[in-house]
Amino acid sequence: MNLWRLEWLRLVRTKRIVGLLGVYLFFGFVGPLTARYMEQIIENFGGGVQVVVPEPVAADGITAYVSNAAQIGLLVSVGIAAGALAFDAKPQMGIFLRTRVGHVRDILTPRVVVMTAAVVAAFTLGSVAALYESVVLMGSLPIGGWALGTMLGSLYLAFAVAVVAAVAAKAKSVLVTVMITVGVLLALPIVGIAPEIAEWLPSYLVGAIDGLVRDAAFSDYLRSIAVTLALIAGSLWLAVHWAGQREL
């Protein structure tokens, strides 16, 4: 059995793929519902207090999905990716795998590719669910903007997996890998408080779907796309370099 098939079976048989799909699909269906019925929800939980909220539009459903996917969905994705990429966290497993390949790259490549594909697929399916619910409940959306936004959101998730790979090559456990990665990903929006800096950061892509289904232009994200691609390449290079130097 080659490492590609092994990684796919590990993802499926441990039910990790179910967790990924479940989180994103849940928010894909629930997000637009909360956006559509927010006024009623607030009134029910507010003890009958009269609340006036703006009439919801279809883009609000996408916004609700993105806000949850960028928080809980991202956290789940990082946790599952860390479990796959921090293979040296268990020395016995690390030794077993390393003694059966010519280079550590042969271990990392299938794990990074399969993990990225799984996260992107889950995010995309959740986005499709959010699109469907939003259109049914609140009206039409620009499909082109939604598709481009979903692609850019997927690029950000690919960046997150690449960061996990780099951190896992240095960290001593899965938990430490998750904590450092989440810290890095949370630091980016803080750095991006300044608008002139934000447009260069990978975190700017998180809101791409929301922006592109409203009034943003694709060109607004070109700088962030370029930086994100460069950081993905750099993170993967570091992952291979550090993992190759690691002593078990």
Image: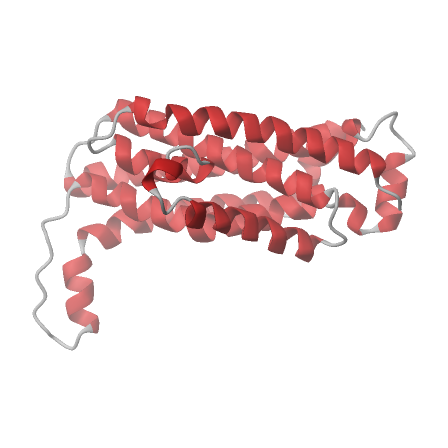
User: As rendered, which of 131 and 1 lies closer to the eye?
Assistant: 131
Q: Is residue 160 left or right of residue 112?
A: left
Residue at 28% x, 41% y is: 62
User: As rendered, which of 76 and 194 lies closer to the eye?
Assistant: 194
The quadrant in which the N terminus is found is top right
Residue 186 in the image: above or below residue 97: below
Residue at 47% x, 35% y is: 156
Quick check: can you spot residue 52? Answer: yes
Residue 188, how many percent across, how many down?
A: 47, 45
Residue 146 in the image: above or below residue 11: above
Quick check: can you spot residue 5? Answer: no
User: As rendered, which of 14 and 152 lies closer to the eye?
Assistant: 152
Residue 33, how many percent across, how many down?
A: 25, 51
Q: How many marks?
A: 0
User: As rendered, which of 182 and 7 lies closer to the eye?
Assistant: 182
Query: Which image quadrant is residue 149 in?
Result: top left
Q: Outermost residue, right direction?
A: 99
Residue 78 in the image: above or below residue 230: below
Q: Is residue 127 left or right of residue 144?
A: right
Residue at 34% x, 39% y is: 207
Residue 196, how many percent across, how many down?
A: 35, 36
